Amino acid sequence: MRIITQSQVERLLPVGVCVDVMRQAMIATSRRDVTLPIRQFMPVPDAAGKLAIMPGTLGDPACFGIKLVCKYDRPHGDPLGTHVGMVMLFDSVKGIPLAMIEGSSLTAIRTSAASALATDLLARKNATRLAILGNGEQAMRHVHAMRAVRDIDHISIWGRDQTRTETFAGAVAAATGIETIAHDSAAGAVAEAQIICTTTSAKKPILLGADLGPGQHINLVGSAIPTTAEVDDASVARSRFYVDYHDAAMAAAGELLGAIERGVVTEDHIVGEIGAVADGKTAGRQSDEEITIYKSLGVSAQDLAAAHAIWRLAETEDGGVTIDLLD
């Protein structure tokens, strides 16, 4: 079994490479060549944290495993981030462990790569203007991910702390060489955008349907529990709404569930899974004027596909640390 660290994960699976890995993982998900128990959370007594448990199987490559992630509230900029954990990868044929892989970077990479896949499938082909709402780790990850699938030439940034927003905008400009503007409102940030990524920890909507314009594509990334939402009911209602996995969306997609509960839309508002779009089974964008939304919750098939790709590359170069479990 190999133990693969954070720096090795970053080097072995850059986001541009991971987009194609996510394409195959999401196609497998929509074909149901997977086992995907709904993510479980276990509270940690007397601590501001919880353990997320995500088991699953993948048919091709044939593997199974589990991601264990500790989600703790930490100060902005804490080097540990909010997600610390690992992915345990097993071979399905032999039933043996292949690798234990650092989970924070793997999760961050596969999440932004999945958003890039959705953007590639749903955003207008000539989209060049990007808005990022939020200024945490996923915000920068999504800047790089969107550049992997579109020729971005302008970036707008908004966050709830204006000082952090301005600092982050400077960091984005320095990292990309692209004109980057800090805005003092979410509405201002998205006004001219063609691609929007919400990467916040907001409990209530920070983006309204009235703020959206024709032809925009939105990746909803930050909210992952049914009681929180980054956009309002009007945003959901105005959009062609896509998800990563239908069952997970109906269990935890706060924006959608809230709109259903309030009678604004029904479950049928889900156009389909992004894997079905990639597989040619579900139609994507139908016109340049439509607003499309991809609701990202994350599924273990993504973790397993990313982990297997990392393990395979590590095997090729004899990377990581190898241990013999039989000693």
Image (cartoon, rainbow, N blue to C red):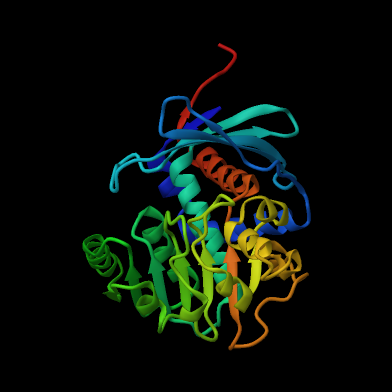
Residue 72 appearing in the image? yes
Using the rendered view, name the quadrant where residue 166 is placed: bottom left
Is residue 11 left or right of 324 when viewed as pictured?
Answer: left
In front: 324, or 260? 260
In front: 84, or 24? 84
Residue at coordinates 67% horizontally, 60% vertically from top-left? 261
Residue at coordinates 46% horizontally, 48% vertically from top-left? 12
Q: Position of residue 239 (x, y in %)?
A: 61, 76
Is residue 20 left or right of 205 when viewed as pictured?
Answer: right
Residue at coordinates 28% horizontally, 47% vertically from top-left? 77
Residue 120 appearing in the image? no
Relative to 147, say whether 319 is above or below.
above
Residue at coordinates 51% horizontally, 22% vertically from top-left? 323
Relative to 55, say whether 120 is above or below.
below
Relative to 303, say whether 324 is above or below.
above
The C terminus - image quarter: top right
The N terminus - image quarter: top right
Using the rendered view, name the quadrant where residue 82 is placed: top left
Q: Residue furthest top?
A: 327
Q: Position of residue 184 (x, y in %)?
A: 28, 72
Q: Position of residue 65 (x, y in %)?
A: 64, 35
Is residue 55 left or right of 164 when viewed as pictured?
Answer: right
Using the rendered view, name the quadrant where residue 117 is placed: bottom right
Q: Position of residue 273 (x, y in %)?
A: 70, 63
Count how many numbered circles sit on residues in the image: 0
